Amino acid sequence: MKASVIVFPGSNCDRDVAVSLEAAMGKKPAMVWHGDADVPQSDLIVLPGGFSYGDYLRSGAMAAHSPIMRDVVAKAKKGTPVLGICNGFHLLTETGLLPGVLMRNASLKFICKDVLLKVERVDTDFTRGYSEGQVITIPVAHHDGNYFTDDDTLNRLEGENRIAFRYCDKAGATGGDANPNGSQRNIAGLYNETGTVLGLMPHPERLADPALGGTDGMPMFASLVEALH
């Protein structure tokens, strides 16, 4: 399996996700600079978390126009799996690969803590290592993680089973206090129409090693390697 991690000015989780990928793949991913024109041949492209371009204008707005993103979008549309984490999720919405927007948290405060997620689907290359309905712990670290779109789009996402993860409580319930940022329908991550593009706000790479205090993020990387090797 060959993976590429796209690096933007302001990325701060690019090395973290590279470490998780190397642990799962047994080799280092390619680190691709945002100013390059082409992504090398890859079975997986990762858009990491961070603050690309300092989140000026709005999160991901400037990075979405980086030269490399033209090739990322083209490859995604041809079926190359793409994982966008936190700021990477912003990029996926800014480029139109995923619908909706990510607004300021309802509290208007930066949130950095472990949250509980309910796994909604286990039939994609990203999630086969989990069980349907499983509650996992994954950290969030964002100021703009409040997912919003119109009601028709929300209903379409539900009807097409494109919601990947929801914020939940220990029992898997998705009401009230389980939602850290105000996201509609507790959406923490979602897929494109084919299930080959996943955007999620929480950071699986931050709990993918026992030394980090948990391993609930590890099955995502292991699942990708098993599916794409």
Image: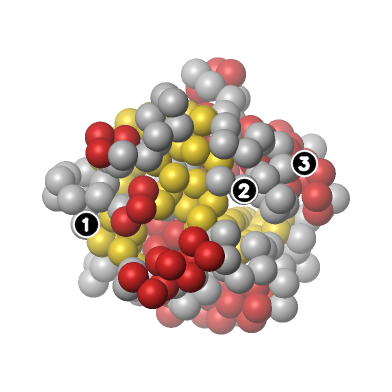
Residue 12 x/y as whole percent: 42, 47
Q: What secondary structure is marked by label 3?
A: helix
Q: Choose the circle earlier in sequence order: 1 or 3.
A: 3
Find disc 2 in the rendering and name its residue: 121
Q: CA distance from mark 1 to mark 3?
A: 35 Å
- The numbered dot on residue 104 is 1
The secondary element bearing badge 1 is classed as loop
Q: Residue at x 77, y 68 (%)?
A: 41
The structure residue drawn at horizontal position 79% and vertical position 37%, both measured from the top left corner, is 26
Q: Label 2 neighbourhood size at 10 Å, few (<14), some (14-19), many (20+)?
A: some
Q: Amino acid at mark 3?
A: Met
x and y, in percent, of residue 104 in the image: 21, 57
Mark positioned earlier in the residue sequence (2 or 1)? 1
Q: Quadrant of residue 149?
A: bottom left
Vertical relation: 132 (above or below) 33: above
Asked if residue 25 lies left or right of residue 175, the reply is right
Residue lying at 38% horizontally and 74% vertically, measured from the top left:
152
The residue pinned by badge 3 equals 25
Dot 3 crowding, Cα within 10 Å, few <14, some 14–19, many 20+: some
Above or below residue 84? Residue 226 is above
Residue 93 figure quarter: bottom left
